[in-house]
Amino acid sequence: MSVLQRSPVARRPVPGPAAVDLRSWLREESGMALVMALAVMLVLTILVTATLAFTSSSSRDASLKQQGQSAYALAEAGLNAGLAQLYSHYYDSSGAPTNNTTLYSATWFTGAGIPSSQQSPSSTTACTSTSTCMSWSPASWTPGGGAFTKGVLVLQGVGRVPNPTGGTPLTRTVSEKIAMEQLPARVSTPSYWSELYTGATGQPCDLQLGQTVNANAPIYVAGNLCLTSAASIEGSAVTLKVLGNIRLQNGGADIGKTTAVTSVQVGGGCVKSNNGAYITPCPINTSTTQIWDQSGRTTAPAPTADPLPSIDFAGVAAGQAASTVACTNGVSLSSATYFLTPASGAGSTGYTCTITDLVSSSIVGSITYNSAAHTVAFSGDVYFSGNLDLSTTSPITYTGVGSFFVAGTVTAANGSVLCVHVASGKCDTANATNTSSPDYWDTTLSVLIIQSQGALSATNLTFQGGLYSATSINLGGGQSATQGPLVSPQLIVPGQSLNLSFPNFPFIISGTLGTSAPKYTLFPTAGGGSF
């Protein structure tokens, strides 16, 4: 039997597991490039994706903002178009105000409401769902609002453009708040301020002209007229209306003997006698009465009554009360007695008072007294809640066009002088109508109208300007020398040196007796918009 024997190779021992060298394994780099490549690709993918998303978002945002700006520009253009339509009803092409009758009307606006409005300022094509669009319309209208503010309008402009991202169109709105105001302003002068007007009746002589009075201006007498001594009424620009009788006394008085007046109208009779009976109807253009006009008639026709309008003292007071009133040097327009040129105390070294509208910041009235230069400058309407004293210690000259409204009385100390030009300590009345003289009274630059609810009285007052009193005007008892119109619904006693030869007043300040309402003016007060 044979014995199996193992091969020497088979008899070799089987080796055990090889020892692992950890440090060598960690240093092994095979396969890392793939991992890093994948990581880089992932990062790049994220960055590209983020960049694309950011770029797309920025592009959309830029498009939205650009379209929003376009819509805003269209809204502003629409507002400007609406403003142009509004302003055309208040101003002419030169910018001068023209309207004092129609405060406001919504019918003035066209183009109100999308899509009936136009596509752009240069294109009146109607809007479509995809086109740019502009419109304008009143957002609100509130009548009133203050003494000078007659209404407040909020006007808006709307712009619309397509949304670049789709969906609702982009709409922007801008607005402007506008106040319609009637500020005191220069207006045309009514006939009352070119004449001597008295509404007094019931006396034998409701108006008496005497001494050296030479009247060369229209005269209206509601009662009876008397001329004494060498008084006369002359001039081709003179109209004489007397609702009562005319008496020429003391021999030297006449009407139109040297220069025939334009017309004479008399409601009663006339006589050239100290106490003779009136002849009715009044004979004219005859030596019997020494009354001459240019009509060629032999008897004077009867005039129609010409009643005075009222002065809105309360309205002027309310306007000033609703304004900012500021005076320097202790002066107050609400003083019990306001001294225009004070000799002592408050304002004696000079002062300035201004009345400023709260809405437009316009100065609606002012007075400035320069004590060193002996001058007064004024403008607009000024209301005095008490009395007004015109006393002067030395001749005072004035400049400016304005109206004083006095709730109380007006007085002046004996010998007070208030003039446009002074010569020899008095008003230079002789050169007031002489256009070649340096003392010519330029009524476009200087006209003062004083109007009082109480009596107006002064002795030896020298004054150039217009005077009104609702109660009476008494300048008698001395050598008062006033040059300018005198107006009262009651008695007027003119001074012995009354001068009714004065330049016409082309315009005076609104609010004055008989004046028309001032033109409306517009003042933007606030604006805004949405974006």
Image (cartoon, grey):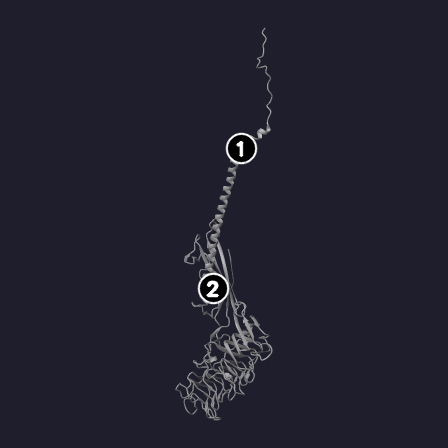
> Label 2: which residue?
106
Q: Residue furthest top?
A: 1
- Give the x, y percent position of residue 45: 50, 39
**Would you say residue 108 is visible in this rendering?**
no
Task: Tell us which disc is closer to us: 1 or 2.
Answer: 1
- How packed mark 2 is, by other alpha carbons closer than 10 Å (few <14, some 14-19, many 20 or more), is few
- Give the x, y percent position of residue 295: 40, 85
Between 383 and 347, the one lying in front of the other is 347
User: How many numbered discs sit on the rendered protein?
Assistant: 2
**Would you say residue 64 is visible in this rendering?**
yes
The amino acid on which the numbered mark 1 sits, given as a three-letter code, is Met
Judged from the image, the secondary structure of the residue bearing numbered disc 1 is: helix
Between 208 and 429, the one lying in front of the other is 429
Against 17, residue 238 (above or below) is below
Whichever of labels 1 and 2 marks the residue nearer the N terminus, that label is 1
- Give the x, y percent position of residue 298: 40, 88
> Label 1: which residue?
32
Judged from the image, the secondary structure of the residue bearing numbered disc 2 is: helix
| Residue at the image position 56 percent from the left and 71 percent from the top | 325
Against 458, residue 156 (above or below) is above
The amino acid on which the numbered mark 2 sits, given as a three-letter code, is Ala
Alpha carbon distance from label 1 to label 2: 81 Å
Against 7, residue 341 (above or below) is below
- Give the x, y percent position of residue 506: 45, 77
| Residue at the image position 50 percent from the left and 44 percent from the top | 53
Task: In the rendered structure, find residue 240 and report the number of the disc placed on it.
Answer: none
Between 504 and 377, the one lying in front of the other is 377
Against 58, residue 277 (above or below) is below
